Amino acid sequence: MAVLAACSQREGGAVSIMRSKDGAPSVAVTWCDDSPPRQITVFIEEKESEKLVTKFTTEKGRDHFTWLDPKSPGSDWTLISGDARLVPGVTYRLMAWPDAGKDMYYGQVSFTLADFDDLKPGQINGRYPGESFTRSGFIRYAQDVCR
């Protein structure tokens, strides 16, 4: 999994893949500001073609952390476009940002479905192969990125 950076925006958090507590492949988002953003957008595209796969938003960020199971997003998330069917063998790019995303972003991460194989329920993929975070470790990582 590779972490990419944008040049014109301030990094205000982190985004990564995770296994939810029930084991579903999911997305983890955390931010550095003390108050949650008004809106969070999660965007997944095919990395090579840059073709949109799915885009979701929520207005329910709390406690420096939110997560999304794209196949079963729950009532806090709104599907804006696409559908959440991911297929093996494709490399995806995951991005997240607050509000309109003009001034800040939460990062970009490339992943394949195979990257979920080593994650146990509740674990968030780390920066390096074989590294993983707990929820609190992921929030601390983002706080370090923002300093």
Image: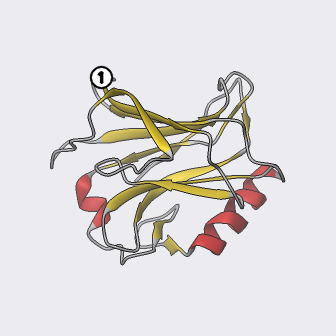
Q: Residues within 10 Å of mark 1 (few under 14, many from 20)?
A: few
User: Is 135 on the left or on the right of 80, as rendered?
Assistant: right
Q: What residue sits 45% from the left and 73% below the top?
A: 123
Using the image, determine if residue 5 lies above or below residue 103. Answer: below
Q: Secondary structure at mark 1?
A: loop
Q: Which residue in the protein does label 1 denote?
A: 51
Location of the N terminus (image quadrant): bottom left
The relative height of residue 23 versus residue 64 in the rendered view (above or below) is: below
Residue 145, percent across and down? 73, 54
> Which residue occupies the foreground of this view, 143 or 38?
38
Report x, y in % for residue 140.
Answer: 72, 67
Dot 1 amino acid type: Lys
Q: Residue at x 77, y 60 (%)?
A: 144
Left or right of 30 on screen, residue 84: left
Q: Nearer the viewer, residue 2 or 45?
A: 45
Q: Position of residue 147 (x, y in %)?
A: 84, 53
Residue at x 59% of width, y 42% of height: 107
Is 134 located above or below residue 73 in the figure? Answer: below
Q: Is residue 84 above or below residue 21?
A: above
Return the residue nearer the eye: 102 or 68.
68
126 to the left or right of 92: right
State the residue at coordinates (77%, 59%): 143
Residue 53: image x %, image y %?
Answer: 30, 31
Horizontally, residue 83 falls left or right of residue 137, namely left
Closer to us: 80 or 3: 80
In this view, the residue farthest toward the front is 75
